[in-house]
Amino acid sequence: MNVGGVPLRPLAAAPGGDAVVVIDQRALPHRLQFATLASPQDVYTAIRDMWVRGAPLIGAVAAYGLALQARADAGDAALAAAVAHLQSARPTAVNLAWALQRLLRHLLALPASQRGDAAWQEAGAIAEEDVQVNAAIGRHGLPLLQAVAARRPGPVNVLTHCNAGWLATVDWGTATSPLYQAHAAGLPLHVWVDETRPRNQGASLTAWELAQAGVPHTLVADNAGGHLMQRGQVDIVIVGCDRVTARGDVCNKIGTYLKALAAQDNGVPFYVAMPTSTLDLALADGLRQIPIEERPAREVTHISGRDAAGTVVEVQLTAAGTPAANPAFDVTPARLVSGLITEHGVVAAEEGALRRLMEGQR
Ligand code: MRU
């Protein structure tokens, strides 16, 4: 997607094949800042500390981390250790394991002498595929928005949570891809952007992205969604996901479940944009089986923003010593999900449909 009219992606392989350059998302929306990751440890830190974030993006960046390892030491033991380390950076989004295991399998089938170049190429393939997958999600999601537009005049009001935009992927985003495609097709749109406490990915990333693309949007506090739905101001909810189980339970950013409950109570369709790299057929019960990342309490007790002088500062919200918990994701049971928008089409959040979808791709 474009920033200031110039195409930009959140990651790019350095031309020398010795590093990956990423947008350091901690600085947005106040500054567009880049970071060069030149070792597997750099990549681990960037994922853990959320310089890069979003399920598909951390998978692609991790693949480059393993490729950097393969350049340094491509022996079986070194690769396996790097996979274990990178995979431990964040536990919830399955794309991290998906990308690393795919690349590891590819490399172990080759002689060690070929693994450095092959790893770099395969990491590039993982990244490029993500772009195509997300473009396809946009094509399959677009008719859902067109159907709303066909029912009544005025903009289609979409609510989204967190950032499942191009910053969370290699391009297009997942939940935002239908929005960008609808906007390009001239469909009138308006997006309610949940701020997404505690890290505010909606406020600082999604709102910024939509502004860059000229998509009309309004930022709301997380607690406003139910009220907007009760007043008929939301036509459809579209969110991303970090892991979807075989029976269609959806794990996504904390607060997603509450939006799904409100959507159900108000008859608002609740769709999840899901690249199949986020589907974990090995798990069934999302509530009991998906590991939920617990992040530092400081993300809840403190907040950062720009002061009047333009300097980004962190301030404390709470009394000193206030205990805080910070579960980063929640699980929306399949029964609350209207459908999963995948690169192969819209599918029911239901085991038979998901297994058939994946068998059809073999
Ligand atoms: O903690 P984050 O910012 O990595 O969480 C991101 C989300 O929850 C996204 O909705 C999800 O990863 C899908 S991104 C296309």
Image: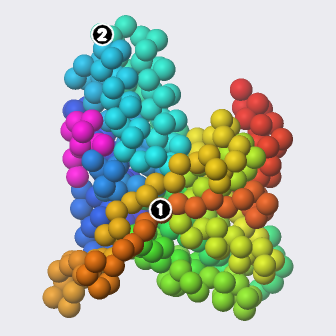
Q: Which residue is mark 1?
A: 328
Rendered residue at 46%/11% (across/down): 109
Rendered residue at 47%/77% (across/down): 195
Question: Whole-percent x and y of residue 317?
Answer: 31, 84
Residue 37 lies within the magenta run: yes
Q: Is residue 137 visible in the rendered structure shown here?
A: no
Q: In the image, is 332 to the left or to the right of 59?
A: right
Instruction: Say which quarter of the image contains residue 153.
Output: bottom right
Asked whether mark 1 and ligand 1 are closer than 8 Å, the reply comes as yes
Locate the N terminus and report the quarter of the image it occupies: bottom left
- Magenta stretch bounds: 35-44
Amino acid, disc 2? Ser
Question: Taking 76 as reference, is 319 above or below it?
Answer: below
Amino acid, disc 1? Ala
Q: Mark 1 and mark 2: span between their CA atoms?
A: 41 Å
Locate the C terminus and report the quarter of the image it occupies: top right
Q: Residues within 10 Å of mark 1 (few under 14, many from 20)?
A: some
Instruction: Say which quarter of the image contains residue 188.
Output: bottom right
Element at label 1? loop
Residue 58 lies within the magenta run: no
Query: Is tag 1's residue or tag 2's residue first in the polypeptide sequence?
Result: 2
Question: Whole-percent x and y of residue 60?
Answer: 43, 41
Q: Which residue is mark 2?
A: 113
Q: In the image, is 342 to the left or to the right of 60?
A: right
Question: Taking 259 as reference, is 129 above or below it?
Answer: above
Question: Taking 148 as reference, is 110 above or below it?
Answer: above
The front one of 92 and 358 is 92
Rendered residue at 27%/67% (across/down): 27
Q: Kindly identify which numbered label has been placed on residue 131.
A: none
Callout 1–callout 2 Cβ contact below 8 Å: no
